[in-house]
Image (cartoon, coloured by chain):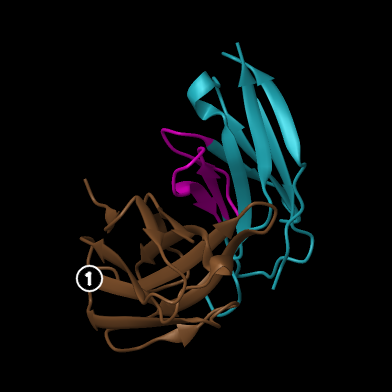
Amino acid sequence: DAKTTQPTSMDCAEGRAANLPCNHSTISGNEYVYWYRQIHSQGPQYIIHGLKNNETNEMASLIITEDRKSSTLILPHATLRDTAVYYCIVRTPNGQNFVFGPGTRLSVLP
Amino acid sequence: DVKVTQSSRYLVKRTGEKVFLECVQDMDHENMFWYRQDPGLGLRLIYFSYDVKMKEKGDIPEGYSVSREKKERFSLILESASTNQTSMYLCASSYYGRGYGYTFGSGTRLTVV
C-alpha cells in the first residue's frame, strides 16, 4: 500500500490560508489521494479527493504535483472551527479500504 | 442530509458482557466498515462488508464479530467484552468503487469496566 507522510502539527492564523502538505512518493498510477479531517470527539469528515488534476470544492482545494508524489490541501480562509486532525490517505490497491495514518493536527489561532 | 447513525454515543459495559454496536446508513451504500480509534494508534480497521451477509476481516478482528443481515445495517459484536476493548468505535459506509470516499458516523465511546 502506498503510504503518506504528513507533519505532526501545524498552526495557522484565523483568516489566513492553511496549507497542509502530504508526501506520497510510492503512489500508484491509479490511486486517488483523499483528505479527511476529524474534529475532536467526532467521526472523520470527508473533505476532498483527486487523482491527477487539482480539485476545488466548497471546503477546500487540493493541489497534486505533476509527478503525483505529493499534494497540498488548502483551506483558503481558516476559521477556529477548522481546528482538527487532517488525514491524507491514498487508496489501497484493492480499492476498498482506507488506511488512516496519524495525520496533521492543525490549530487555527485567533 | 445523508448520514451514518450509530446507536449509542456513550456506552459502559462490564467485563464478560456481550456487546452489540449498531450502525445504520441511509445512503444505499454497498460497503460498510467498523474502525476503532485509540490515542497514539489512530484508526484501525476491525471488519468490513461489501454486501449483505458478506464480511471480511480487517487489521484487528480478534475478539470481534460482525453481522450484516440488511444492506443498511452493520453490527459489531464483542462476544465477551474485555477492558482492552475500551475505545472509540467508528462506523463508515461508502459506495462500491475506487473513486468514492467514506461517510463516518459520530462514533460510540465504549468503556468496559
**Residue type indicated by callout 1:** Glu
Q: Nearer the viewer, residue A46 or A43?
A: A43
Height in image: A42 above or below A31?
above
- Region in magenta: A34-60
Q: Colour of chain B?
A: brown
Residue B38 screen position, x and y as percent = 60, 56
Q: Residue at x 37, y 65 (%)?
A: B94
Left or right of B67 on screen, residue A82: right
Height in image: B69 above or below B1?
below
Q: Which residue is mark 1?
A: B72
Quadrant that contains the N terminus of chain B:
top left
Q: Residue at x 71, y 65 (%)?
A: A27
Within the image, what quadrant is residue B72 found in? bottom left
Residue B56 screen position, x and y as percent = 46, 86
Height in image: B36 above or below B2?
below
Q: Residue at x 41, y 33 (%)?
A: A58
Residue A3 screen position, x and y as percent = 73, 64
Residue B75 screen position, x and y as percent = 32, 74
Label 1 element class: loop
Q: Colour of chain A?
A: cyan
Within the image, what quadrant is residue A29 found in? bottom right
